[in-house]
Amino acid sequence: MIELEHVTFRHPNASRDALVDISLDTQPGEWIALVGANGSGKTTLARHLNGLLLPSQGSVRVDGMDTREPSAQSAIRARIGMVFQHPEDQMVASTVEEDVAFGPENLALPPAEIRRRVDAALAAVGMAEQRQRPPHQLSAGQMQRVALAGVLAMQPAYIIFDEVTAMLDPAGRGATLEQMRLLHRQGCAILHITHFMEEAALAERVLVLHQGHLALDAPPAAAFGDRARLRAWGLDQPPAARLAACIPGLPPGVLTPEALLAALPPPPPGWTLNATQLSDNSVTAPAEALVDAEGIAYTYMQGTPLAQTALRDARLRVPAGAITGLVGATGSGKSTLLQHLNALLPLQAGRLRVGPFDLADEHTNRVAVRRFAGMAFQQPEAQFFQTYAGDEIAFAPRLAGLRDDELRQAVRAAMQSVGLDFETYKDRLTFTLSGGEQRKVALASILALAPTLLLLDEPTAGLDPQARAELLAHLGELSAAGKTLLVSSHQMEDLAALCGEISVLRTGETTFSGPAGEVFRSAAFAQAGMQPPLAVLAADRLAELGWAIPPGVSRLETLCCILAGSGEAA
């Protein structure tokens, strides 16, 4: 189907090869997962498969057609559909419906067939009701759904999914994976690039890239069996495999949540709870609130036929010095609410205080608000101003008046805090960075200004497992040092690891707020389309089976520590 022979590629002006001597072939109808650390070359490899990039050395053939042949490129791209890592890159029309129709129209299909394909594709991704909306008004997760619909409408033989679930809520993520299963059953070949190891475990074959080299090509059970080897590549085992290793009596090769929950056994004879292990997320929030919002409502393009209500009755309290989570389905208003907190969006209704600033007062200094509350956007490239990564990170502190020696020190510290080596990355062109590297640069550019309040919109999306773990650890350190953080995320495991309290948004309204363990088990959480972390599901199931699990557990590490137990079986 697709054959690569000794493919090597170097981006213009780059100092090293992005791909190094890669040879592989794929079979018809295969489901392949492509994993690797940020910057390992995954997207670069994917763009070789449909001729968007051409190898510096070696060759790529699709059904016998060489991607170097100009006469073959249209046929290759009609056979290989690609859902990009940044969905806005493939938006070309003024409405969702027209964008999905663009590809079939260029295939010169009859209008009735185009309409049938557009209707089916929008229904498949759950965006039929948004068909008349402009794409630029959609959330990042909604744009990913539209991008997928545009590819599905083309009905290609092969589809490349490049981090398509990174911005999706749990329900959307599950629906997308189910769509992949359906396509696979229908004979469509799938290449799925992902940083979620539990998603990679669903594939028939796992390819691991490491610094541009093909480090491993194996079935999931073999690929995820050696945790030390995975960590050396910046990866990790799926959460189900890590948790299974803590539970005595489980068979080897458990990789998915479904397999883990089905295999959980009753407690072994002699197992007792280690009395030193307590429930996590049990900290008491300080009384003082750094952010206090009540009754926030906001409508985009208010007063026009295209008006779209994003917030109806949002309430939020962020305790000083704590990490608070914000969850909700795609389009629930999370990003809109965050952009109120640093005055990027004007207050249309409600009451909002951020630190010493009253944002209902039109005389409040908005620039001062933004220095107090720094925000890292959901789409990091949207906030880049500069050509080089180092200059981008230095942009805000330079405007704040830091001297050259102070500026260099602030940039170096901010880069190191997110795992970017100063000397390696300071002169990297921002457009050559991977999606995960862009996210790190965006976060470093905010940290360099040392804001009191950090607003983080999907901070770990696009990060490899090791980088995600390092960033979560650093955010915990910032909180311990007195910083206040508000984190919006679709990754419940990340919020479980970070947050003491979480607020739930549903269609623009706050429906529940409380300690993380309570929120994950609440009816409001489920009604918002959320799915609890695996640790919550496993802890509750283990308790049903007779294990003495304390209430409120939501962190994987805490559950593993509890399961170590004490006594004979431990």
Image (cartoon, rainbow, N blue to C red):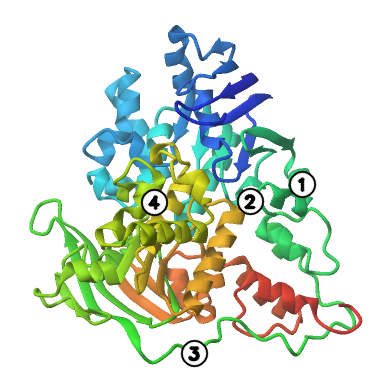
Reading the chain from its start, which is encountered first: label 1 or label 2? 2
Secondary structure under the numbered disc 1 in the rendered image: helix
Give the Cα separation between the discs numbered 2 and 3.
33 Å
Residue under the point 63% across and 36% down? 32
Give the Cα separation between the discs numbered 3 and 1.
42 Å
Give the amino acid at mark 3. Thr
Give the amino acid at mark 1. Ala
Residue 482 is situated, as x and y percent measured from the top left of the image, at: 44, 80
Reading the chain from its start, which is encountered first: label 3 or label 1? 1
Please say if the residues under marks 3 and 4 sit with CB atoms less than 8 Å apart: no
In this view, the mark in front (2 or 4): 2
Q: Which residue is mark 1?
A: 221
Residue under the point 75% across and 48% down? 229
Q: Quadrant of the N terminus?
A: top right
Q: Which residue is mark 3?
A: 284
Using a 10 Å C-alpha cutoff, classify the residue at mark 2 as few (fewer than 14 neighbours), some (14 to 19) or many (20 or more).
many
Specify the quadrant of the image occupied by residue 540. bottom right
Q: In this orientation, which residue lies closer to the viewer: 224 or 234?
A: 234
